[in-house]
Amino acid sequence: MKRRENFIWGFLIVVAIVLAFYSGIRTYTISKQIREFRLEDKQDVRGFDKQLLETVTTLETGLKERMAYEFRTKKDPLKLSEVIRSAKLLAQLGYAENLEGEENMRLNLTVIGDNPYASIKYMGKFHNLRVGDTIGGYRVIKIDAKQAILRKGGRTLTLHNRPDPSSIAEQVKLTGTFIPNLGNY
């Protein structure tokens, strides 16, 4: 029985050694594969494609440039008074003066009362002025129902109420003709 016991113990020891050796080799192989995967993972950037990166960079640069771009024009392209430019056509429509330019003044309206004021369009903007105020170097010296008188040095400028050139264009567009209103605009 001692022999059988020795044989079983010997067999178990051999099996244990073989299993230990097999486990060691298997563990070494797995750890080697893990090291290779980690090394590959460090070198490999997931989703990296040089052409894709260049395309994305180009698109982002273009978007930033477009967002930084400011569109400006010297004149408003949607301004209706730019529609009618012919002095001859304006004369036929009953509007004797040339269209206002950005540098010219046009009396838009006057409000008469205890403290009268005039709305004057100058440099493309409307300014509400009272007697004594200045605009474009001119001082407002008088405002009445149909005109505003301005003075700059020795030069006097009289602005009369006139229809807005864009309203003339609108009336011509709707009716086909311009009927001048001789009253206060």
Image: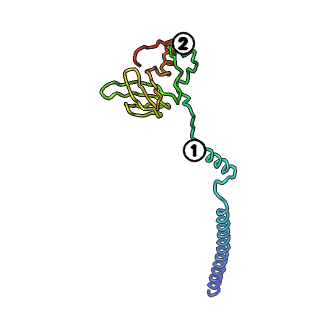
Residue positioned 30% across, 27% down in the render: 114
Residue positioned 53% across, 27% down in the render: 101
Q: Amino acid at mark 1?
A: Ala
Locate residue 70, reporting x and y percent. 57, 40
Residue mark closest to the camera, 2 vs 1: 2
2 or 1: tag closer to the N-terminus: 1
- Horizontally, residue 83 falls left or right of residue 114, namely right
Residue 147 is tagged as: none
Outermost residue toward the bottom?
2
- Could you say which is closer to the camera, residue 65 or residue 164? 164
What residue is disc 2 on? 92
Residue 68 is tagged as: 1
Image coloring type: rainbow
Locate residue 170, reporting x and y percent. 49, 18
User: Which structural element holds mark 2?
Assistant: helix
- Horizontally, residue 115 falls left or right of residue 150, namely left
Q: Amino acid at mark 2?
A: Gln
- Could you say which is closer to the camera, residue 133 or residue 62? 133
Q: Residues within 10 Å of mark 2 (few under 14, many from 20)?
A: few
